[in-house]
Image (cartoon, grey):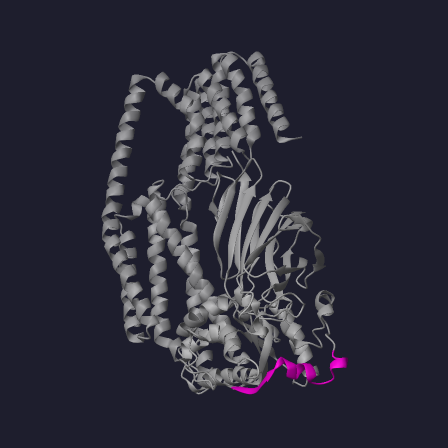
Amino acid sequence: MTAPALGVAAAGGFAGLGLLAVVLAPARRTGRRLVLFVALVVAAGAAAGAMATAAPTGTDAFDAFWRGVAGGGVVVLATAASPLACLVAAAAGLAVATAVGSDVQWLAAAAAGGSVAVVVGAPGDRQLLAPVIGAAIGASLFHLDAFDGGVAGAGLAAFPLVPLAASAVARASGEARHRVARLALLAGTAVVLVVAGWGVAAAQARGRLLDAVESTRSALAAARGGERDRAAAGFAAAAEEFDEARRDLSSWWARPVLGLPVAGRNAKALHAMATAGARLTRTATDTVASADPASVRMTGGVVPLEKIRALEVPIQASLAALERAGETLRPARSPLLLPAVADRLESLLAHVANARRDAEVALDAVRAVPGLLGESGPRRYFLAIQTPSELRGTGGLIGNFGELVAEGGRISLTRVGRSADLNQGGDPASRRVHGEPAYVARYGGFRPQQDWRNVNMAPDFPTVARVIADLYPQSGGQHLDGVIAVDPIGLAALLRVTGPVSVPGLPGPLTADNAAKELLFDQYLRFQAPTESTRVEFLGAATVAIWERLTSSTLPGPPDLAAALGPAVTGKHLLLHSRHRGEKRFLSLAGVGGALPEAPGDMIAVINQNAGGNKLDWFLDRSIRYRAMVDPASGELRASVVVRLTNSAPASGLPPIVIDNLRGAPPGHNHTYLSVLTPWALEGATVDGREVPMESQEEPAGRYAYSRELQIPPGTTVEVVLRLQGVLAGARNYNLAVWRQPTVRPDRLDLDVELAPGWAATELRGLVPTGGASRFGMSNALDRDIVVGVGAERDG
């Protein structure tokens, strides 16, 4: 039986039983038995309230008390109110329960039906039925879906009780009203005294909390600057100030407020924040005293592995403290918090969550990095130097490569070469890609096993790294433990750490400011034919020079190093893959893994591959506009992808290696192989408004790839539009992952997500409203992978 049918049946049944009782029951009842009966119903109503879940104070015992008072009070009001008031209250309760939903909606329907008998019955019957109706109304209101302890939920629950209260007051005698007024005055005076006592304690605590926050900020600044003693003293001072604030909020004159609805919630939240602050700063004091991350520096090409291992215990302690802080703070959340308290609580929770993620990465780092650096034996890595001015899936053509060996924390560059060397190494005719059938099916036609320039066409870096590790020994190399990919933008970030280097053939030093442009474009102007061999030598010399400076310098500690390399890492200009299973989690958390997203949900990736054998992607600008229309009820999704490719290259005046096209197109024409990755079926596509077919294949990561070769003349823009459709599981919690290809310049990204009519957002992640309650978007530079989302519910 459906819920509405059950409600109708319950209403009819209770109405019928009530009327039957009116007809069959005796006309008179003794007063003592009636009082006992009402007392039992009041007790039942109080018990039902006590067992509900509303938490007006945040303290279990006090919450149960107030719920019991409310549950029994509804019965008392119903007993004292008029029959008509009972009917109106029951009808209002049923309306509210029907509108917002209730676990026991049938009770509201039963109360509405039974109240008919209260209206038509004799006085004695009303005296028996009214308390029962009151208990049913109270029980149904305590289980409203919207009754979350917040002001709005409490208002909905209290609304049907207004006619009961008004009628009970109107029917009460003057003596009874006088007693109620005196009781209210006494209760109000007690509340004022309790709140005043807490106000004094809160005023004392406020100054100490502000001082504690300021001491924490100073300590953090000192820690970042390597001033360990000053940082430890600052954290210790902050811990003492937090403790003093916590003691103020726990004083005997402050504690009674915990029993008051609303006020108790806010007092408990402030106490939780002071407690968490004290614990965290005390742990920070111990951590600063026992650990010095800044001392973990590579000097002379050697990383001190024992100092890395020594960080594990203090990081574990910090992580445990952050977990305890979260456990302390999360229960303090409540819709009853004042905005100022709620904002500070959410801010602190966000800081704790971010710090916990950082601590998890740090813990994984101290466990994984020693292995990556050859703690238990030599590790060999392929160094792929990519050139995004000639695009490939993971960034750019691998023109140069190196071989790194790490052993006992010492890192050596043992080989530098060109991809042409690998093409000629081993037996080219017998080389095969093993264990990657999806990769072979998608990219086998580009002959990556014979031409290393096409090895990294797949956008998923772990897949590419496994293929490189497979092909390198077949191309004259040795067994690999992992693969590192870096492009000139990543090398520029390294130069920001090491300082400038001198490279033969370059008039001035190679610096963090000029390295990207010099290595991606200017070198082709500087070393033109017949000095092409000089240019090749220059690339190798630049790689060696940067490496020698890196291994001969004393690098900053991990915090400063991470800050310097952070943009290059998030932009995927520096990638790392290890073939050792235990290290993959760290690489993923650190943001250097380069994998396509595996999480379920919506996903979009736009990938260009240079098909002209030139460097025209230096001049390529891309914009991506993605619009998705989602029906959370059915999961149906319709989307469109608009990719605009602008070629700002000139038609002449540049060296052939930059501007000519191996596909026979005129100079300056960018011949590109465009792919759009998505989980959804393709309905149709256009290029500059003209319907065109698209290649349809599967990527190794389990997405569809819709591709087409395009020619973009100099100074023009080509617009490609794809229309998509599919069915999304779990559409009430919509997630969209946007994957970034590491191009020379970040793409321009515009997102537009629209919910079907009748749906509204309950949560926005990375999106902002752009049109009412059902349309959201964002517009930004795509300088990293992003994930955005919308939580949805029925509107109204």
- 53 versus 511 height, above or below: above
Q: Quadrant of residue 425?
A: bottom right
**Picture coordinates of residue 180, whole percent (x, y):** 31, 25
The front one of 366 and 673 is 673
- 557 versus 276 height, above or below: below
**Is residue 428 within the magenta segment?**
yes
Q: Is residue 302 visible?
A: no
The front one of 274 and 534 is 534
**Is 685 placed left or right of 647 in the picture?**
right
**Is residue 708 within the magenta segment?**
no
Residue located 69% across and 50% down the image: 681
The stretch of residues the image draws in magenta is 412-431
- 298 versus 166 height, above or below: below
The front one of 628 and 157 is 628
**Picture coordinates of residue 554, whole percent (x, y):** 40, 83
Q: Quadrant of residue 329?
A: bottom left
